[in-house]
Amino acid sequence: IVAAYLKRIDTIDKKVRSFVHLEPELLLKKAQKINTNTPLLGLPIAIKDNICVKGAFTTCGSKILKNFKPFYNATVIDKLEQEGALIMGKVNMDEFAFGSSCETSCYGPTHNPWDLNRAPGGSSGGSAACVSARLAPWALGSDTGGSIRQPASLCGVTGLKPTYGRVSRYGLIAFASSLDQIGPLTQDVKDSALLMNIISGYDQKDSTSVNTDVPDYLKNLSGKISGLKIGVPKEYLNTKGIDEDVKKRILESIKLLEKLGAASQEISLPHTEYAVATYYIVAPSEASSNLARFDGVQYGLRVNQGKATDPSPLIDMYMKTRGEGFGLEAKRRIILGTYALSSGYYDAYYLKALKVRTKILEDFNNAFKKVDAIITPTSPTGAFKLGERLDEPLAMYASDIFTISANLAGIPALSVPCGFTKAHLPIGLQILGKPFDEQMLFKIANAYQENSDWHKQKPNLL
């Protein structure tokens, strides 16, 4: 199996460019030694470049972590290996997960397998693209504002952001610590449920991990959803900038779920319009704090300038290292976050954003008193062209308009393929659930996939 995937990678990944760190000979040696009498049978899995794997390059798509190799595994990696998974290699991402197109990586962009001139989405663009191109059976990504679900939508695969605290973040290099979650990208819901069975659960090494029971996610995937109540927020389908193709496919998907026995009703999430603005105060503020540790002192890039006898050699080294090590988008977010946290602006920006975040959570809590799950588009459009939004940060940020709210509220959200645009680009259906109710999302999505074949479609790259 590993040899077959490596052969396909050798043929196709020069077009897609999803992998950034891959050692084929070492991988084959590990495959020969692995005990296949395990739940995952030695199957390979691709890992986003911000999840630590002991002794393997983990660089977050950034020059500032050049040649960094962790001396420990992330908890999710330990769990996967205990179940017999084979860690395949690292896949591309926007630098430090800052982006929605997988273009800000120091390794260059990943290309969308459905149209190589278009972006795969981000920041987990490499994870989504490699699964879509069948270069790996599944992958792990991370989701801070839509970074699993938006690329899953644009690449036509299944992607889950678990409830905040459901999956350990230990060993995930942090972007925004109150928003980040690790999750799976797979070809279908059953594979996603299988991986969640393995990576979920309490971890003492992660202070944000929640000590609550983890169900068997593979149970209750019966395809029966009769009697379930599904909410359709009016704010989402009437959003400015949503493609008519996307809106049409979402409405068709809702009709299919109704045909299967679910009842839909219009709901309101009134603070949705403030989600993007709130996110781009909270996330950069946390990023500014988290990225302060990358200074060239202990690991990664160091740019030595001047002499020890100079007036401020240490400050000079900091400035040169961070100036050359971080890309444009990383610098933009660090500056935004530092400004929002600075004296005189903290109350006006960061504190106000936290209050709005609470209002967004209250919107969901009120909605879930009436419905079992919420249906929305994942992305307002299909995949956009590479370079199209790179110089327009606000247009890029708007790519996550439908996904950000779930991170701010900490709730689980799942994206599944639900059709194509007129240009034959994948469209994603997003299902949002109550905290720690991933089981409900899987139940609805599995019923949808048992009665449609969008998830079975694959791009032609040969």
Image: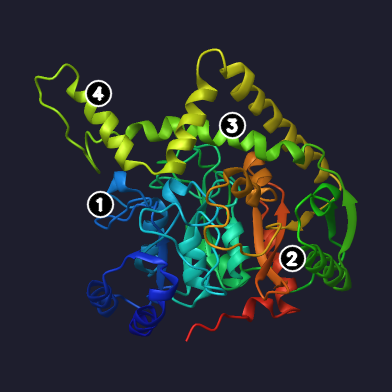
Locate residue 160 relative to residue 15 in the image: left or right: right
What is the crowding at mark 3: few (fewer than 14 residues within 10 Å), some, or many (at least 20)? many
Determine the CA span between mark 4 and mark 3.
Answer: 27 Å
- The one nearer the camera, 201 or 176, is 176
Which residue is rendered at x = 23% and y = 26% of the image? Answer: 316
Q: Amino acid at mark 4?
A: Ile
Q: Amino acid at mark 3?
A: Ile
Residue 295 image offset from top left, x and y in percent: 28, 33
Label of residue 69 in the image: 1
Q: Report if residue 174 is visible in the image.
A: no
What is the crowding at mark 2: few (fewer than 14 residues within 10 Å), some, or many (at least 20)? many
Q: Amino acid at mark 2?
A: Ile
Secondary element type, mark 1: loop
Q: Which residue is mark 4?
A: 315
Which is more foreground, mark 3 or mark 1?
3
Q: Which residue is mark 3?
A: 281
Which residue is rendered at x = 66% and y = 23% of the image? Answer: 352
Q: Which residue is mark 2?
A: 444
Quadrant occupied by the N terminus: bottom left
Locate residue 139 relative to residue 69 in the image: left or right: right
* Sequence-wise first label, 4 or 3: 3
* Sequence-wise first label, 2 or 3: 3
Locate residue 321 relative to residue 308 in the image: left or right: right
* Sequence-wise first label, 2 or 4: 4
* Sequence-wise first label, 3 or 1: 1
Residue 384 image offset from top left, x and y in percent: 61, 62
Secondary element type, mark 2: helix
Determine the CA span between mark 2 and mark 1.
Answer: 40 Å
Which is more foreground, mark 2 or mark 1?
1
Secondary element type, mark 3: helix
